[in-house]
Structures are given as structure tokens and as C-alpha cells.
Amino acid sequence: MSKGIRGRVGANHHPALLFEFVTRRGCHLCDVMEGLVEEVFSAQSVGYERRDVDTDASLLRLYGESVPVLLRDGKPVAKVRVDRAQLRRILRRSRRGE
């Protein structure tokens, strides 16, 4: 079940950046990656939408068992494992339009 938009919204919020976190219930790697995404994105006032791969046929076709996946504007920018430094680079590149 989706938790909706996550992260803080404040003066530095970047609404043009659309991030989605594709996950599944009971997935340990998903829980770990979401904790990092929440930590890094919240610190940068960036939100994201949580999407359950098992409740969306198109996501299930695309990613199947290959979750978690972080999408930016519908395109994968991180899969399965990511660290804080990688997430910070993803945000920097996103803000520069890369």
C-alpha cells in the first residue's frame, strides 16, 4: 500500500523533481534502501512517492523481482543497493538536469 509523498516540504523543496520508490512488502533490501532514501531526501527537502510493485501490473512487468528501484521522472536511477553518497550524487545530478 502506498504511503504517498514522503520527505519534508519546505523552502528548499524541489517540486520539479519527481522521484518514485518501487518496493514490495516484506522485502529486506527495500526496507534498507528506503531508510537511506528517506534520510538523504529529507535532509535535502526532497519528496518521493512509494509504489508497490505487486499492485501495479506495469511496474511488475518492468521490475519483477528486481526491487527496490528508485525512479526519477519514470527512469531508473538506482536499483537494489545504493549508499548515501550515491543518493547525494543522484540528487545533485537531478538538480542540474542531468
Image (cartoon, rainbow, N blue to C red):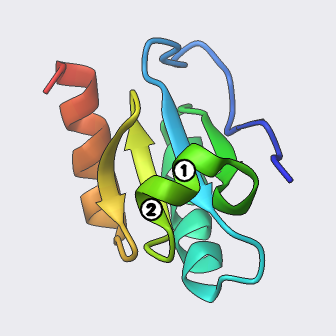
Residue that label 1 marks: 59
Q: Which residue type does callout 1 highlight?
A: Leu
Residue occupying image coordinates x 83% and y 46%: 3
Residue that label 2 marks: 63
Q: CA distance from mark 1 to mark 2?
A: 6 Å
Residue occupying image coordinates x 45% and y 62%: 63
Q: Position of residue 21 (x, y in %)?
A: 56, 50
Q: Give left or right: position of 84 versus 69.
A: left
Q: Position of residue 47 (x, y in %)?
A: 60, 33
Question: Which residue reaches farthest left?
Answer: 98
Q: Nearer the viewer, residue 20 or 53?
A: 53
Q: Nearer the viewer, residue 60 or 40?
A: 60
Look at the picture and state if 80 lies above or below 45: below
Q: Secondary structure at mark 2?
A: helix
Q: Position of residue 26 (x, y in %)?
A: 76, 83
| 10 Å crowding of disc 1: few (<14), some (14-19), many (20+) | some
**The image quarter in which residue 69 lies:** bottom left
Q: Which residue type does callout 2 highlight?
A: Tyr
Q: Secondary structure at mark 1?
A: helix
Q: Position of residue 16 (x, y in %)?
A: 44, 12
